[in-house]
Image (tube, rainbow, N blue to C red):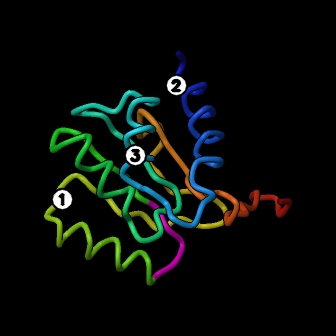
Amino acid sequence: MKSKHKLLIALILSALALPLCGQDYHAESERLARLLDWHAGSVVAEIGAGAGQMTVDAAERVGPTGHVYTTEVSERKLEHLKELAAQEKFHNITVIKGSQAGTNLPHECCNSIYILNASRFRLQRADGYR
């Protein structure tokens, strides 16, 4: 399956994945890992990482030879994600400040990109239209 199709499928499924209050991040991570073929050495990205539960789980799944890019727009959440990565001693997590204009992920960085709870996002195009 082409990577563009995998990305589209992941975005759609992830948007529908955790609408319930009692979110089971480990189970969702397991489902995404199967769907997107995460394995040792995979490079994945999470857009809108929140408290970082999925980031940590993804980092464990891709292992030390893999990498996880995690993005957030909130300065407070960014600091928390940096502390979490250091506390858990993950050397395979890169925290990136996103914006309404874009994710700021490196170009063609990843095998897969996912967004959970996407309803809270409103990305704005560079020309000002939503």
Relative height, residue 65 to residue 96 (above, below): above
- From the viewer's side, name the closer residue of 14 and 26: 26
Percent coordinates x, y for residue 49 in the rendering? 46, 63
Q: Amino acid at mark 1?
A: Phe
The residue where tag 3 is placed is 29
Q: Residue at x 83, y 59 (%)?
A: 130
| Front of the two marks 3 and 2 | 3
The reply to whether discs 1 and 3 touch (Cβ–Cβ < 8 Å) is no
Residue 64: give its label: none
Rendered image quadrant of residue 89: bottom left
Percent coordinates x, y for residue 116 in the rendering? 56, 54
Q: Residue at x 41, y 58 (%)?
A: 70
Percent coordinates x, y for residue 107 in the rendering? 48, 42
Q: CA distance from mark 3 to mark 2?
A: 19 Å
Q: Residue at x 66, y 40 (%)?
A: 12
User: Which range of residues does the magenta coloring cover?
Assistant: 71-75
- From the viewer's side, name the closer residue of 105 and 47: 47
Q: CA distance from mark 1 to mark 3?
A: 17 Å
Determine whether, in the image, residue 65 is placed left or right of residue 13: left
The residue where tag 2 is placed is 3
Q: Amino acid at mark 2?
A: Ser
Which structural element holds mark 2?
helix
Q: Amino acid at mark 3?
A: Ser
Answer with mark 1 or mark 2, whichever residue precedes in sequence. 2
The residue where tag 1 is placed is 90
Determine whether, in the image, residue 97 is placed left or right of residue 67: right
Q: Residue at x 18, y 59 (%)?
A: 90
Percent coordinates x, y for residue 81 in the rendering? 34, 71
Which structural element holds mark 3?
helix
- For this orientation, the residue located farthest to the front is 22
